[in-house]
């Protein structure tokens, strides 16, 4: 039985979200135009706020016409899948996306964030609870919330032009669904390169049958940072990367509308100085395109690092989340061995390691037994020419803190990743040959900046067809010289040979990774690289359920 307090997270910048508990039979409030606070006469929802009645066949939720023969994101198949998840207690939350200012260890930056916090406020529920969350958009451009890692109803997935119309500036959107996927997850926008600002927050879905025992728990979000430094924005970086490509970026939403007032992104010599695409980068499997000047741990730079306090002998669960836009990290806690217990929220056979490799959007849960002293929790940026780190401290006793530039010896091993882990027996997929195999060749070069899947840059009309009930295999073949963390929405897949259950997997240059998933969540679901500059330049597509 756990002895820690679920709310004692010790993470500055991670505050418990305000929530209310309603009875299991409660229903959300009537649809409202959140700008004028007037209910619509027909109870429907338009582009000012929620779009279409969730669960109503033929709603206008996706903002486009679903191609003939495919499940609508709010169609009856989606409604039935949500019904099977059940209806638990309703937990209410609110996120306000707004412009704000933060001090990053002596550097003041203008950026965007949720509820004026970095990271945004934690959302924590029990598996089976219904989340009722209102997004208030105070940004100068439209936005959405994507619930990364959740097996949720399709019209709540937060993908503009596919599952919803993006929430316009000065309007609101209501997300309501059952959270059935226990584990460490997170939320972020799915419009342009907004995730490379401060718009992210942890999402923890507690397992009612949690088998782990520990004294304390930390939630740690790791991020690369460039927004607001020397006036740079992620939009300017994306624009600079795409400057030689006809038509510019190929993503969705309003990714070309940067700046503080929604003006078109301008090209910037400061942004260009961060690009590394024509450099030496084949020396590291995790070569990157953007040298972010800062790397943060729970919103704090190494010179202003957070300190976690514990007692010697305490057993600590650390939930690690890589929220970066363009950076893989090698993560270690100095003088400690970590026991890996979960990957992307799913349990794995416990394995000890001195360090981990984490691609963008990946999550790992680890257990450590605290020693006596002061120890650096360090995330080293992999493949970056500046080799910078994010850092926090574990303090269990007296002693001088190590220099912020100190790198634990544990980082020298290179670390293990998901390919070295095995799924826990209780979450392994049943033995079943695939009913359908979809080959997705990852194509493009950083010289032409023509990232795509099967040579075709993203358009909202793309579909790779599946049918409900199938076992589907996706063969990711990386024909590029860059690595790509590939993410599937609304599902989890199994890595080969009994590997872990995940929603995001690293595909190294010139390698192939085959993943299997059960098509048990109807709708239209994104598959994309979680390097935000690759996806918003074309490396994404859609898996669509046939109706």
Image (cartoon, rainbow, N blue to C red):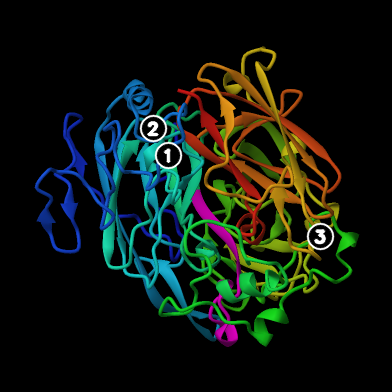
40 left or right of 225?
left
96 left or right of 296?
left
Verify CB contact (< 8 Å) between mark 3 and mark 1: no
In the rendered view, tell whether residue 360 sits above or below residue 436: below
> In the rendered image, which residue does mark 2 sit on?
127
- First-in-chain label (3 vs 1): 1
- First-in-chain label (1 vs 2): 2
Q: Quadrant of the C terminus?
A: top left
Residue at 45% over, 67% down = 118
The answer for how far apart the CA atoms under marks 3 and 1 are is 33 Å
Say whether residue 226 is magenta.
yes
Quadrant in the picture for residue 431: top right
The answer for how far apart the CA atoms under marks 1 and 2 are is 6 Å
Q: Crowding at label 3, few (<14), some or many (≥20) Cα neighbours within 10 Å? A: few
Q: Is residue 257 visible?
A: yes
> In the rendered image, which residue does mark 1 sit on?
205
Q: What is the magenta range? A: 217-234
Residue 534, image x, y percentages:
67, 57
Looking at the image, is mark 3 or mark 2 nearer the viewer? 2
Residue 186, image x, y percentages:
48, 49
Count the marks: 3
Secondary element at image label 2: loop
In the rendered view, tell whether residue 75 sits above or below residue 357: above
Residue at 67% over, 61% down = 326
């Amino acid at each position: 039985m756990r002895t820690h307090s679920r709310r004692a997270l010790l993470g500055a910048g991670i505050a418990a979200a305000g929530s209310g508990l309603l009875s299991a039979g409660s229903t959300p409030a009537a649809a409202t135009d959140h700008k004028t606070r007037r209910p619509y006469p027909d109870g429907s929802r338009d582009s000012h706020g929620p779009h279409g009645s969730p669960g109503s066949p033929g709603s206008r939720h996706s903002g486009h016409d679903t191609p003939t023969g495919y499940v609508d994101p709010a169609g009856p198949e989606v409604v039935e899948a949500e019904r099977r998840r059940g209806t638990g207690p309703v937990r209410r939350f609110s996120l306000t996306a707004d412009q704000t200012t933060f001090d990053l260890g002596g550097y003041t930056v203008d950026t965007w964030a949720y509820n004026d916090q970095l990271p945004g406020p934690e959302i924590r529920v029990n598996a089976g609870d219904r989340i009722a969350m209102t997004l208030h958009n105070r940004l100068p451009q439209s936005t959405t919330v994507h619930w990364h890692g959740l097996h949720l109803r399709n019209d709540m997935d937060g993908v503009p032009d596919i599952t919803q119309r993006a929430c316009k500036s000065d309007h609101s959107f209501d997300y309501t669904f059952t959270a059935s996927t226990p584990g460490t997850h997170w939320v972020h926008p799915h419009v342009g390169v907004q995730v490379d600002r401060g718009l992210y927050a942890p999402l923890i879905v507690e397992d009612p049958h949690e088998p782990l025992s520990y004294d304390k728990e930390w939630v740690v979000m790791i991020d690369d940072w460039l927004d607001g430094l020397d006036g740079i924005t992620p939009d300017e970086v994306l624009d600079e990367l795409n400057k030689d490509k006809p038509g510019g970026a190929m993503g969705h939403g309003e990714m070309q509308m940067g700046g503080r007032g929604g003006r078109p992104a301008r090209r910037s010599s400061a942004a260009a100085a961060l690009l590394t695409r024509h450099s030496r980068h084949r020396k590291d499997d995790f070569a990157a395109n953007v040298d972010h000047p800062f790397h943060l741990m729970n919103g704090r730079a190494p010179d202003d690092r957070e300190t976690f306090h514990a007692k010697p002998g305490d057993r600590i669960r650390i939930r690690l989340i890589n929220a970066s836009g363009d950076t893989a990290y090698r993560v270690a806690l100095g003088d400690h061995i970590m026991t890996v217990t979960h990957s992307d929220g799913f349990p794995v056979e416990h394995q000890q390691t001195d360090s981990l490799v984490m691609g963008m959007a990946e999550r790992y849960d680890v257990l450590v037994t605290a020693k006596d002293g002061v120890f650096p929790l360090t995330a080293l940026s992999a493949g970056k020419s500046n080799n910078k780190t994010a850092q926090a401290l574990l303090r269990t006793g007296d002693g001088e803190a190590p220099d912020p530039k100190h790198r634990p010896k544990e980082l020298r091993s290179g670390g293990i990743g998901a390919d070295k882990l095995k799924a826990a027996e209780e979450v392994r997929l049943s033995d079943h040959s695939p009913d359908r195999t979809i080959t997705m060749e990852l194509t493009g070069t950083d010289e032409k900046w023509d990232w795509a899947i099967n040579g075709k840059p993203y358009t909202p009309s793309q579909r790779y067809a599946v049918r409900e009930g199938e076992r589907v295999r996706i063969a990711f073949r990386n024909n590029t010289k860059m690595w790509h963390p590939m993410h599937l929405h609304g599902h989890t897949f199994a890595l080969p040979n009994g590997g872990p259950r995940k929603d995001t997997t690293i595909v190294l240059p010139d390698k192939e990774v085959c993943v299997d998933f059960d098509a048990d969540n109807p709708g239209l679901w994104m598959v994309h690289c979680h390097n935000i500059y690759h996806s918003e330049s074309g490396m994404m597509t859609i898996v669509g359920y046939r109706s």
